[in-house]
Amino acid sequence: MNPVYIVDSIRTPRARANQKGGLSQLNPYELLDVLYKDIEQKNFLNLNSIDEVILGCVTQHGEQAGNIAKTSALYSGYPDSISGLTVNRFCSSSLDAINLGQLKIQSQQADNVIAGGIEMMSRVPMLSDEAAIWNDINIAGQAKIFLMGSGADLIASLFNISRHDADMQALKSQQKALNAQKNDHFKSIVPVVNKSKSIHCAHDECIRSDTTLESLALLTPSFKELGEHGVDQAQLNLFPTLKEISHVHTAGNSPAMADAASMTLLSNKKMQDDGQKARAKIISVATVNDDPLLVLSGCMLATQKILAHNNLRVSDIDLFEIHEAFASTMIHCQQELNIDDNKLNVNGGCIALGHPMGATGSIMMSTLIDELERQDLSTGIVATSGAAGAGTAILVERL
């Protein structure tokens, strides 16, 4: 099979997903346009060499509807000949976009692909597409799908993860992210500047520097009321060894909703026509689906699969970027895989940095490559999870 190289991986800052957020006044097309221009200019792209744009987007509704991968490329003046595909695999969407792009190149359907994601949660809120699976209890029950926070509380209950454990995970994420931001570890961030709308957003906004265990302990459980309306009983019926559901997740130890976009440039060439060398090579990919009742355990299963497929152990990998979907999922994943703190999400996770659902996976890829370069390391795994047990992992080698 043809090797696939990551020429570049860039992202916007992650802004808070509310009307005061630094990106909320831009529509998704305007935000993506910043990255289209940057990836073209920085990599001296011949746009006619791009075969396809593949973007992840979870809530394909309103401003994000209408195959935004294709239509945003047209909006930004890219050639009409470029195909466009928008994918929704829940929160694994943009990592799956990279996966699909590399498959296109491996199978010689394409030479160069831009893959990434977009999610403007301040403008197109989560669940605003009103999917029946989230609104019809009969359909949800038949499909065995609950909202992500309820699944995270179930994981906490099954694996004896306490509220204190969850808050400690959140504090650790905040501290790592704050340190990374202060020391300029996020080299792939592209500042977003729009003078006509008085926008200048250059840094991630969701990090809370004043977070303490005491402040986290004051927050109320976010999914207890949902549990009282029937979800707890449904989960207990399906897991009869449990006596109760522990509602440990709050706004402080859950991922912060965010606005952001991301792009990863894939190619069949290690050395570009202008002499520029690719930043990394994709070694292997894995796509899985775990029990939908556990909701967000797919990242762990995908990581295990990619390690087994390549006859590797955790100790063989230099760095892991694993989706910090909720505190309990991260704790359980770290315990099961036995990954040291100095290898895992060393610059913080989604609890601190924010989770723009359809863009997160590709953002994590840029973070991993930045950190491999900063530490002069070689191999890394990015793994994401999504609703219904979805999971994706990609193993890369820095060049």
Image (spheres, rainbow, N blue to C red):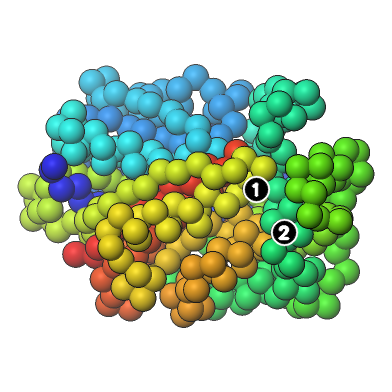
Observer able to see residue 218: yes
Q: Amino acid at mark 1?
A: Leu
Image coords of residue 182 (percent x, y): 52, 77
Position of residue 18 relative to residue 100, above or below, is: below
Q: Which residue is identified by label 1?
A: 294
Mark found first going from the N terminus, 2 or 1: 2
Q: From mark 2 to mark 1, how far is it between C-alphas?
A: 10 Å
Residue 374 image-quadrant placement: bottom left
Label 1: which secondary element: loop
Q: How many marks?
A: 2
Residue drawn at the location 50% of the way across and 73% of the way down: 338
Q: Which mark is residue 386?
A: none
Observer able to see residue 13: no
Residue drawn at the location 88% of the way across and 38% of the way down: 230
Quarter of the N terminus within the rendering: top left
Side of 192 relative to 398 (left or right): right
From the viewer's side, name the closer residue of 184 and 91.
91
Image coords of residue 256 (percent x, y): 67, 55
Q: Which residue is identified by label 2?
A: 158
From the viewer's side, name the closer residue of 301 and 221.
301
Q: Residue furthest front?
A: 241
Q: Are marks 2 and 1 in contact (CB under 8 Å)?
A: yes
